Image (tube, grey):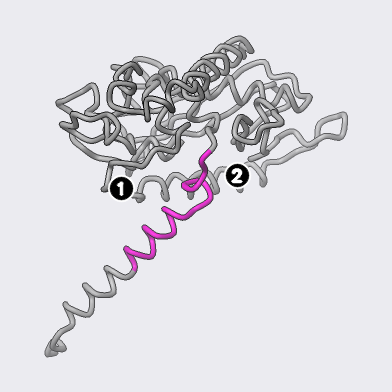
Amino acid sequence: MARTSGSNEVGEMLAERIAGLIIDTAVNSPRSLQKRLGPSEVGDPCERRLTYKLLDWPESATESDPAASIIGTGFHSWMEEAFERKQTTLPDGRPRYRIEERVTVRPSPIEATVVAGSSDLYDRATGTVWDWKLVGHTSLDEYRRKGPGPQYRTQAHLYGLGQENDGETPKRVAICFVGRYHELRVHVWTEPYDRQVAVDALARLDRIRHRVDDPAAAAADYSNAWWSQIPASDQAKCRFCPWFKPGSADLAVGCPGTQADRPARHGFESLIA
């Protein structure tokens, strides 16, 4: 059968249209538009990135691939449905699982300083706060060897505090890492819930916010000299940072990062959490 003339051009046009729809939907999702720091971000080891976020600073990373974020969102929805099917009732009449319940880690009369988010799962029968992470196999092996890192660990305990604020009695936090390729691989990191981890993280956030709100910062017009006083972190996931700008000499424009050998990519696993 003869191929219709121009079919490739039509296919490419349609592909671009669908890709544009996907990107536009991802960029304009409520999560992407959120300006307030959530529990998944509070424990970020990079104070510079947190400062950019608190100031709602113009992003410098121009390329963003939302595919992994979309896949991760779909996985969270799948897990939500799975536990809804497994839902049971405790002897006291309450449902065993709190699934994707929004919790407030720290209430505040000032909207910008509220810390709240959707907790993936809380198991009342065991007192366990669960968080799902869909990751690549290389990352999964690293988390298996080294643990979840400060950001994910802090996030888990912040959600524990959120559950406690809702009247629950969390005993453990657990992060379930699932490999996102063709074979199922699962690794669970867990430790006893420690309220102090969450309290310390919130205190650190307040110190960073205080520096941002200092009138001297505004007087300095948040210049490169001012930004230079704010430390970056060797543990930062620079290639996923919206303010990562390789080779930048002006931190007010973008951050060159702390790992020069890493490629300039943005928008993958950090967006899944």
Mark 1 is on which residue type?
A: Ser
Closest to the camera, between mark 1 and mark 2, is 1
Q: Nearer the viewer, residue 57 or 268?
A: 57
Task: For mark 2, give the secondary structure.
Answer: helix
In percent of width and height, residue 258 lies at: 23, 21
At horizontal 32% and vertical 63% (from top left) the residue drawn is 19
Between the residue at mark 1 and the residue at mark 2, the CA separation in whole angstroms equals: 27 Å
At horizontal 58% and vertical 28% (from top left) the residue drawn is 130
Give the extent of the magenta segment.
18-35
Q: Which residue is mark 2?
A: 80
Residue 64 has which mark?
A: 1
In percent of width and height, residue 227 lies at: 33, 23
Residue 203 has which mark?
A: none
At horizontal 44% and vertical 33% (from top left) the residue drawn is 53
Q: Nearer the viewer, residue 262 or 258?
A: 258
Q: Is residue 140 left or right of residue 253?
A: right
User: Which image quadrant is residue 218 in?
Assistant: top left
Label 1: how many residues lie within 10 Å, few (<14), some (14-19) or many (20+)?
Answer: some
Q: Nearer the viewer, residue 208 or 42?
A: 208
In percent of width and height, residue 109 lies at: 71, 31
Q: Residue furthest right?
A: 92
Q: Which secondary structure is most common in the magenta stretch?
A: helix
